[in-house]
Image (tube, rainbow, N blue to C red):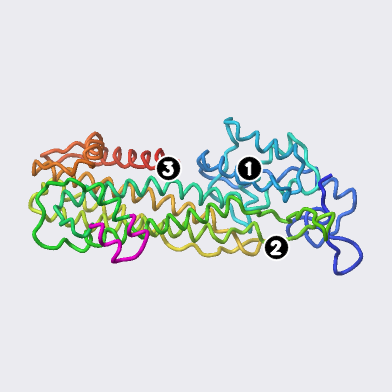
Amino acid sequence: MSPLVPRADRVGSAITVYGVTSGYGDRAAIRLSDRERKEQASRPPVAGASFGEPLPERVARGILLARLANFLEGHGAVRPELAEAVAGMLDGGPLPPVPAQGNGGAGEILALGHLFHDLGVRVGLEEKESLALVNGSPCAAAFVGDAALAARGRLELAHAAFALSVEAFGAPLEAYSAELAELWGDEHEAAALRALGALLEGSVGERRAYQAPVSYRILPRVVGQAHRALAEAGRAAEISLRSVTDNPVYVPPDDDHPLGRVWSTGGYHNAQAPPALDGLAAAWADLAALAESQMEKLLLDDDTPENARHLIMVEVGWAEEARHASQRTLLPRGGLGQNDVGSPSFLAWGKELAAGAALDATLAVLCATASQALWARGDEPAPPLAGFLAEVRAHFPPAAEVQSYGAGLGRLAEAFTARVLGGGR
């Protein structure tokens, strides 16, 4: 049996450990008999009830890793056999599909039920072990970790796309000077300046003699905010992946408590991940708005071919997709019994994913337009951008005549998203 030592019940001499000596959820007040305890312990986690599009397998594997990490120091109160079975699911074989939608409730039980029900049947469970599989926040940890990894690749893409726009517009380079970092005093804006400056190094194109439009001059500041959002998401991921989120949680023995202790807590509610995901989504929406503004300036330029001008409508559409996906995630309502406050992690992750994909699309349209402008003038961008421009033109070749642009832009957007995922995860 798992090494659980219940706390004394304040009402009487009997002891209560949630989900061990009592029922689950709104049956927490019901004390179980010995027979009922054994029957409850032997039942696997509730079979998956939610449905919808499945999570990407990379995310499901992240959930497994986070769940396993919760077992390693004994806080889940599970047998080694169960921990080994969870670790075995990471061997590269196919995983049970986990729906990304319909996962209401105070924790992540519905999604984790999809992942662990069959394992519970196969391995067999003892007291507390079913709860240890499904009562925690490994999904939130995986979501914010997944988003933070992808954000690295997405920021690299944004650096290149905006630098290409700077070259196509011929914006003065003073707004990207490394010396501004000392004046501004912010590490994330300094990182943006370094990244943009490196991509524009060696530029020989003709620059405008007057200051660039606002959307070009504030570029390092706005990109700097995206760097800041990435740093916050990375920190939330690091903490979440090592956080003990079990409920009830087993605290191993110490000198004062030789048998250990068991506490009911709200550890399964990850309060860091949703705001961090919201921060990334907002950063992507801001960058999409900046891409839209820069594209408008490019299209108003006399050197940009007229056959590209109606693409601003496409850009506006995708920028609005990003804007709508970036709305703040608040605590949702719950359900019956104890589940009176829901977990927002699934909602926040879905919105960040949508905002990121919308940004990829806006950057694709901006880059296609910048490529057209450079081609029309017969100019080349700074040497560090040559390979990126070739990638853009491989999917969206420049053309002198009006054509059906949708297919080429779609291919370029898909290539950008694949670049983000390949570079970051």
The amino acid beneath tag 1 is: His
Nearer mark to the viewer, of 2 and 3: 3
Task: State the predominant SS element of the stretch in magenta.
Answer: helix
Of the numbered discs in the image, which one, if any, rests on residue 338? 2
Earlier-in-chain disc, 1 versus 2: 1
For label 1, the residue is 114
Q: Mark 1 to mark 2: distance in Å?
A: 21 Å
Give the percent coordinates (x, y) of residue 69: 64, 46
- Image quarter hosting the C terminus: top left
Identity, as a three-letter code, of the amino acid under mark 3: Gly
Q: Is residue 55 left or right of residue 68?
A: left
Q: Residue at x 85, y 65 (%)?
A: 9
> In screen coordinates, is 38 left or right of 274?
right
Residue toward you, 390 or 110:
390
**Disc 3 designates what residue?**
424
Give residue 42's quadrant in the image: top right
Q: Is residue 118 magenta?
A: no
